[in-house]
Amino acid sequence: MKLALLLAVSGLALPGAFSVADAQEPEVKDPRGPKQARAVRVDTPPVIDGKLDEAVWQQADVISDFHQIRPGDGTPTTERTEVYVLYDKDAMYIGARMYDSEPELIASPTNRHGLGMPNDDRFVIILDPFNTGRMGYRFESNLNAMRHDALYQNPTSFQLDWNTIWDVASSVDGKSWVTEVEIPFKSLSFDPNVDAWGFNFGRGIRRRGEEVAWVSYNRTYNPSTLGKLTGITGIDQGLGLEVVPSLTGTRKERFAPDSTSQDFEPSLDVFYRLTPSLNAALTINTDFSATEVDTRQVNLTRFNLFFPEKRDFFLNDLDLFQFGNIGTSTTSNTATLRGARENGRPYFSRKIGLSSSGEPVDINYGGRISGRVGRWNIGTLAIRQDESAGVDASDLFVGRVSAGVLRDATLGMVFTHGNPASNTANSVMGADFHYLNNRLPGGQAIEGEAWYQVSDTPGLEGDDAAFGVGLRSPNAAGLRGGVGFKEIERNFNPALGYVNRTDIRDYTADLGFTRFFRGARLQSWFAGVDAQFVDGIGGDRQTEVLVYRLSEIETSSRHKAHVRYLQNKEVVQRTFTLYSEPGRQYTVQPGEYAFDQAEFSVTTAGQLTFSGGMTATVGDFYDGKRTGIASTFNWNQSRYFRLGLTHDWNSIRLPQGDFITRLSTLTTQTAFSSTLFWVNLFQYDNVSEEIGLNTRLQWIPKAGQEGFIVLNYNMQDRDKDNAFAAAAFDTSVKFRYTFRF
């Protein structure tokens, strides 16, 4: 009855929004190309000042044959875009003029380097120097000349936290905004024998919900869908040597019991290109004190949460360590939580340099050799981790190789050795296969993978393997879907990897349909169903999740809404605690539970001065009831100041009693200039009853040169009587400088 009611609600007409006659069919079936552009070599490089007024730009060819990928597919753009490409022996120079009939409405809320730009009018560059169609680099910027770079781990997903050294400047010039980009060849791996690089550009016009590309396929662009940039010869990486010394001063105070410690430590990172495409790295006395703190999560499940890597040393060349497409193959399936998607990873870098309780552990030294040799991709990592909390100092190693086979496939192997959290030895071996073909008739694509691993841990004999397969059609428009399976045996134990559930068989499936519209109000509509079924290897059902995505819409102004209906089944084998307070614990007892929930969500466009959203979840929860409200509010006051507030509230009513969980986050970002930033993160949750403040003053006079002042202050209400007391206060001052030769 409830499901029928929601189906009826989701089908209600939106007055004036669209009609069947508005449905837009693609005018161009395949806007991919083939397209080529020529990079022009110059003797004198342009000045990167965001003005495009140097005469040297007149030597460049003009690239202007752009098209829409949203809302249209291959249709003409509403505004003209012109791109120019120059280079000399040291760097590539890209200039872009993005015409805009209403320049006062250009959206640029992002005011700090290193952040994604989902709500900005942005300019995007994708480079594949090896021209393999499998991996690549992504560079983005906006009117504020903020730098955001990413590394593609495979053709369809990229690592947002990766970064390198490059420069950009932007300005408004009449009825257009202009950006100039300099990408040093010292920042890229490449094969000097390849003179035609994979290359692409994109542009976003946020107020119209318009995405623009030079080359695209099925409304997307990534390393598997690129044009060619020709004429690149005689480029130089210098000696290929980078020396990055750092100095860090820290003061740590702990209360109850009181203790104070001070430290002043130098550290050193050295990077050397053995060849233009093969890199070596050395780190000594590695320091992570300036790394951003994790965003808190409230866990209402019985499984471990997953927190992504944020430390620069481990993010470099991270794509080369990606195995089996684990963690990325089911990202569109809303029935799977992040921990379930990542389950079975043989290598998870956050296991290094952190104890099992999450406390930092010193890394004495480490080395990495990574890159490409011919058709081989190589990633090796060796770390010496210091002793801590009863665990001896340990030597850790990760090795990963893969190679392109056939036209669209990659075959690889992985090996890990060492145990950072125990004195028990451990190793893992595995092999994987990945396939992606986006040249199918009708603008369709197909992707699949298969992988197998086995671990070796003394005392755990047999049942120590994990394996999986997946097949999907990841289409942005029309019909899409996929199926996946993985089995994690009882004793599979990757000490350098991530496992949150063993002795299971995990089945996933999703099917959906997206339709784009020509109407001025509605851009796209999606409906589908996602599923996950988890069985014990013995055959008993443990988890069953069905998400009916009844209606998900996005307007041309980028407002979004969705209605979903969730059916859950959980077979709890051991008692677990949802929430505790002095003298009482709220637990879920062993047994079989079936509970349904409805979810409603509305989100306004993020480029607006004031934006936000709310998601409400109501229904059953194990043997009780749950009402949850997750809300966000953002104030883009100007290009110099942003404020964000999130609040996650859950009211849980169980036979044994009621409780409420709260998680609140307040962030502010102040840009005093394009080189000086002040960021504050305030977090509170009533599960741990901790209040945390992280404030960072960051000075970046130039990419590769950074100074930080970081303060962390935590308060805790240990007795949950609303009497908070200081728990910890840390101060760090760090300076880092990159010398390139």
Image (tube, rainbow, N blue to C red):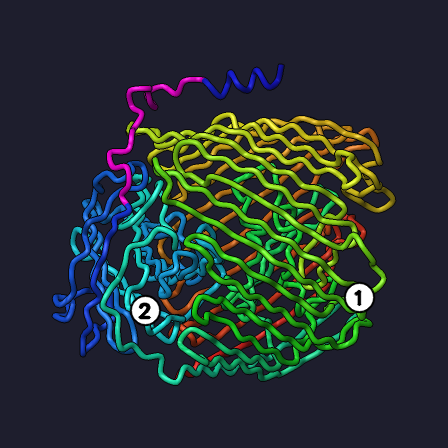
Q: Magenta includes 555?
A: no
Location of residue 49 by image quarter? bottom left
Can you see residue 162? yes
Point out the image quarter for the N terminus. Answer: top right
Pointer 2 residue: 194
- Above or below, comparing residue 501 to residue 740 in the picture: above
Pointer 1 residue: 256
> Residue 632, how many percent across, how many down?
52, 42
Q: Magenta residues?
A: 12-31
245 relative to 684 in the view: left or right: left
> Residue 399, how many percent across, how many down?
60, 69
Front tag of 1 and 2: 2
Name the residue: 48% across, 26% down.
551
Q: Magenta includes 13?
A: yes
- Residue 52 badge: none
Name the residue: 44% across, 30% down.
513
- Above or below, comparing residue 734 to residue 215 in the picture: below
> Toward the viewer: 373 or 118?
373
